[in-house]
Image (cartoon, grey):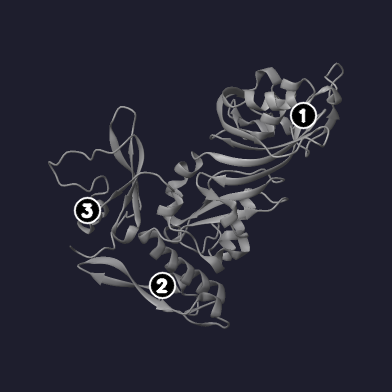
Amino acid sequence: MVWWARPLSVASDSLWALTPRVAASTFTSVAPCTRLPVCQGRAGTATRGQQRWCASTAALRQEDWTGLASAWLVDKPSGVTSHDVVAAVRRSLGLPHPLNRSVPKSEQVKVGHTGTLDPWATGLLVVVVGKATRLSPYFTGMSKCYDVEILLGSVSDTHDITGEVTPAPPGATAVSAISNTDIDAMLSNFVGTYSQRVPAYSAVQVGGQRLYKLAREGNAPAEADLPVRPVTINSITRTDAGDVPGQIAFRVDVTKGTYIRALARDMGDALGCGALCASLRRTSVGELSVADAVTADEVELVGGIPLGDAMGSTPALQLSAKQVRQLGQLGCRWWDEGEPDPQCGPGPTKLMGPDGVLVGIYDTSADGRGKVKVNLLRPISLLPNV
């Protein structure tokens, strides 16, 4: 069900009263719109697109306050960018373009993703809408799992099949001389933390400029001068039978910031034959699986997932209705003045309100200090007085 919203004055506060109405997709003609002032056209009527935006925005307002249906799992196809997927989700939900100046900035609804996939890659993209975008750093920090295929004996400037592919340089080890035992040993050696040199074609900044822009202009730093960062490979499992010479297929679980293209390059260097990434599919982000994902055009049909579920097995703290209201009013705490700070474990803790709704994130640093890092109830609380 899609909800319309209308302003209601309660105790001198302008809140939103939510009233069920028919879905926006059922509108087929121009009709007067009096529910939201922003929907008013020059003649006092709203176009179908404006009506659709009003209904979608009202629904998202409700979802913003309750934490429901604010994240979608999208299976990105090959040939489109992650930004294209975000734009498609925005269109599917009937939300206005962020550059649409006819829509007040205060009425814009943010839409974003939590981890870029290369255009040629496929798989899970977590798209967040409304106040769920505040949780992006937590989704980005989750481990990610990929199904990968690499080709031995070839290299490219992008370390994948989209770049300029050339044979391995003279003196490289012949692919035919590499046994499955050598490959299995190489894969096991990569499990753990190692220093990875970022690809020349990446969004990493050097001297205030993106590396991929410098590479396209022919001004990329030398290979040895590219930034090096520590990354962690949690696990690698070979998924092929080893019966196709020159190809390796495996599933890898990695931490934030790991470039799979660079991992393929490093594996080729370890074998001495050179390698590039031929296929890449993201299968999971944290506990979220691509098996539960839909296409960008289907998000309106299936709805989103509760943010509490999206945060997976992150430790949770149950708040009472009174505490939730205090969190909405105070912003930085839910406990009474003079009470000790809550004793939560290190890292993030989900703050769950009545009915299992995520209302915020409390984060405890390594020194034991904690604070409310995300408050999904701000700037106002829609909960009744308790």
Of the two numbered discs 2 and 3 on the same chain, state the one appearing first in sequence.
2
Q: Decide: is 378 above or below 367.
A: below
Residue 234 image point, x, y percent: 55, 32
Per the rendering, the mark at residue 275 is 1
Q: Is residue 87 left or right of residue 37?
A: right
Corner quadrant of residue 250? top right
> Identity of the amino acid at label 1?
Ala
Mark nearest the camera among 2 and 3 is 3
Mark nearest the camera among 2 and 1 is 1
Residue 191 image point, x, y percent: 59, 27
Mark 2 in CB contact with mark 1 (< 8 angstroms): no
Q: CA distance from mark 2 to mark 1?
A: 59 Å
Q: Decide: is 243 above or below 72.
A: above
Residue 105 image point, x, y percent: 45, 57
Mark 1 residue element: strand
The foreground one among 295 and 333 is 295
> Identity of the amino acid at label 3?
Gln
* Whether residue 157 can be seen here: no
The residue located at (72%, 30%) in the rendering is: 215
Q: Is residue 179 left or right of residue 50?
A: right
The residue located at (50%, 41%) in the rendering is: 140
Q: What residue is pinned by disc 2?
A: 37
Q: Within 10 angstroms of label 1, few (less than 14), some, or many (20 or more) residues?
A: many
The residue located at (61%, 60%) in the rendering is: 296
Mark 2 residue element: helix
The foreground one among 290 and 339 is 290
Of the two numbered discs 1 and 3 on the same chain, state the one appearing first in sequence.
1
Q: Within 10 angstroms of label 3, few (less than 14), some, or many (20 or more) residues?
A: some
Corner quadrant of residue 338? top left
Residue 113 image point, x, y percent: 54, 49
Per the rendering, the mark at residue 323 is 3
